[in-house]
Structures are given as C-alpha cells and as structure tokens.
Amino acid sequence: MVEIKEGFSKLEHRYLFQEIARKVADFQKESPGTDIIRMGIGDVTLPLVPAVIRAMHAAVEDMASKESFHGYGPEQGYDWLREAIVRGDYAPRGIDVSADEIFISDGAKSDLGNILDLFSRNNSVGITNPVYPVYVDTNVIDGREIHFIDCSAANGFTGDIPSRPLDLVYLCYPNNPTGAVITREKLEKWVAYARDCGALILYDSAYEAYIRDPEIPHSIYEIPGAKDCALEFRSFSKTAGFTGIRCGYTVIPGGLMGLNALWNRRQGCKFNGASYISQRGALAVYTPEGRAQIQENIDYYLGNAAILREGLERAGLEASGGENAPYVWARTPEGADDWAFFDLLLRKAGIVVTPGSGFGTAGRGFFRLTAFADRARTKEAMERLVALCAG
C-alpha cells in the first residue's frame, strides 16, 4: 500500500489565501454586481519598470538566435546576477558576502520551504506568531516539533528571546503580516541567542527595500557573528514587482555547517535554475535606471500604506506597520472575531482583507491590509471602511 506523508493530514484543509479566494468567489456568485476592492493578498499591481522590461525583451531576443540562445542555466544562478547582488545589496552596507554564497531561485517562498530538505525532522523549530503560513505548514508536513514565539504590541511584534534552546528559528523583518521592523539591538540579541545555543536562524528579508528608518538593519548580516548562525532569504517579488515572474535568492555562508555545499548539491538534484529571462530582468534591478524606477514604485506603495493608516485612524481602529513595510496590521473593532469582521467587510463594504487568525493564534482579533492596490482603490477602500465603522 502506498502511504501518504502523515504531516499532510495535519494541515488546514485549505491554504489561507485559497480559503479567502473561495469565500470571495462564493460571495461574487451571490452578489455578482458588487464592486470588490482586494486588500488581502500581497500581490503587486504596478507594471514592471521600463528598465526591467527592456532587459527581458532583450533576453527574449537572445532566445531567438542560435548564437545567443540559452538552455539550462547553472542551478545556482548566472554569475553576472550573483555578482551584481553582491555589489548592489551587500557591499554598500559593508557586508562580506561572496557570489558563491548566493543561490538564485524562483522565489523566496520556494526556498523557505525547500531549505528544509537539509534538516532532520528531529530538529525543534521556533516560529514567531502571528506568522507567514508557509513556515508553519512546511514544518508540519515534515513532522517537526514547533514552538511558537508570541509577538504582540508589547514586544514590538518581534517576540521575546526563548528561554529554551531551539534548533531552527524563523524571523521575518520587515514582518509579514504585522509590518513590524526589528531594531539592531533586538536583532543582536537574536544572533547572540542562536550562537549560544547552536540554533540556525532562517531570516526572511523579502521586504527590506521598504525600510526607510536608517537605524533599522536591512540584512541580518549587518550584525557581527550572523554569518555563523543565519541564512538569509530575499525576493524580487515585492522589490521589483516579480510576483508573476518568479525570481529570488538565498544567501548561505560558506563556512556555516557545510550547508552551502549541501544546498548546492540539493539544487543540482532538484532544481534546473531560474529562467534566463527572469534573471536578466533581475539584473536590470541593479542598474542606476532600474533602481530609480523601482524606488518610485516602492514609494508609491508606501504612500498607499500611509493612506491605510490614516483611514484606520479615522475609523477609530488601532493600527501598526506600514511605515517601513507594505503591510498594515489592525485590531478589529470592539474585539470582534476576525473572520466575522472579514465577512462583514466583504458583504457590507466590498473590501477583502486577511483575517489575523489565518497567521496564527496570536493574530486573533486582528486583520491585515496590503498597500499593493491602486491608489484610487486604496482611498476608496478607506472611505468605505470609515463609513462602515461610523454606521
């Protein structure tokens, strides 16, 4: 008899955003004329910037000629992109990362799940709560013991350092879903904890491009000693609008537990590399023109986040995030159940948000808004919310 991996039976029936999509689709069938504003899933809406488009067009043309055609690329990514990442993302911050410590992939989400191929199911795992569901689900599937680290307004949504040793610890800053950022001092404490107890930090910095506060670290490797205890995951999805293009990368220090060589072997076995076209587009991100254009898009989304915060304040709702991140985290009115409030917003105001409990037990009584919608639609959503709360 074929046996199915036991961990799948312990998952929720549907992934969070699949459940939201189902509820919205059911409502649309019931009320087909309703104008729905989607502020739930963190998908970008601005088009790719001109510098990236030109680079990808040129890459397509390369594929049309026998002399410049590219088939399988290196599983680790093309050297020209890995070297551009070193020059563009790490060297300016004084961080010593080499190109052979960078692995290009089809996105941070894939890497965050696939990296678990390297680790025994016997490892204990620390995961902040509320949290991006992928961290939890992938470890549940593998059958690991999970210890939740509660995050709240009291600890700045950065969690308290555990009193017990753990093996793997997930940190995500700027945070999805709360929009919180972590101070250098707090991140130093996490690195010290990991080094003291031999833990490995899986650091998701997919939203670092949204940081505006000069005191907030963009990379965990800004902290001395972090290369001895941390991997870093990054994405072009929210930085450059690559949600549909798929390209990201993971940094695995060469001297860390032999993981660099293991990941290299794993990728050679299970991955054929990100596409040549997507990597050429990613390379354009590091040109002066590309950086300036992408910065305009990021500023646009942060402008939306400011509108969300102002609207929530007018509605009398407590909110945080949105200043150094594209997410705003808000408390439901009068302690309402977050899924019930989701239904109320959808049915009475035509607004889709993400219920906080979808991100874990510590998210109960909260909801997440994203800043990735169109500016006019963002303003309209806040007017509807204010009117609903006033009524």
Image: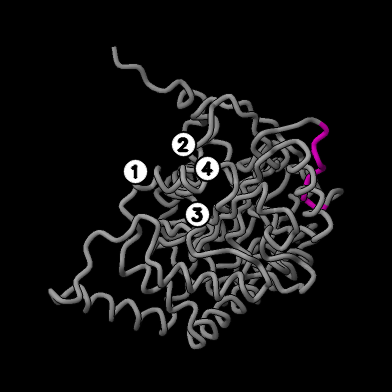
- The amino acid type, in three-letter code, at marker 4 is Leu
Q: What sort of colour scheme is used for the picture?
A: one colour
Q: Residue furthest bottom?
A: 289
Tell me: residue 217, above or below residue 283.
above
Q: CA distance from mark 1 to mark 2?
A: 10 Å
Mark 3: few/some/many CA within 10 Å (<14, 14-19, 20+): many
**What residue is disc 2 on?**
117
Mark 4: few/some/many CA within 10 Å (<14, 14-19, 20+): some
Of the numbered discs 1 and 4, the one sitting upstream in the chain is 4
Q: Is residue 186 left or right of residue 180?
A: right
Query: Marks 2 and 1: in contact by CB < 8 Å?
Result: yes
Tell me: residue 207, above or below residue 343.
below
Mark 2: few/some/many CA within 10 Å (<14, 14-19, 20+): few
The x and y percentages for residue 140 are 54, 29
Q: Residue furthest left?
A: 66
- The amino acid type, in three-letter code, at marker 1 is Lys
**What residue is disc 4 on?**
16
Q: CA distance from mark 2 to mark 3?
A: 15 Å
The quarter of the image holding the C terminus is bottom right
The magenta stretch is: 156-163
Of the numbered discs 3 and 4, the one sitting upstream in the chain is 4
The quarter of the image holding the N terminus is top left
Q: What secondary structure is found at the residue carrying circle 3?
A: helix
Q: Which mark is residue 270?
A: 1
- The amino acid type, in three-letter code, at marker 3 is Ala
Q: CA distance from mark 4 to mark 2?
A: 23 Å
Task: For marks 1 and 4, give the one nearer the viewer.
Answer: 1
Residue shown at 79% from the left, 30% from the top: 164
- The amino acid type, in three-letter code, at marker 2 is Asp
Residue shown at 50% from the left, 48% from the top: 260
Q: Which mark is residue 108?
A: 3
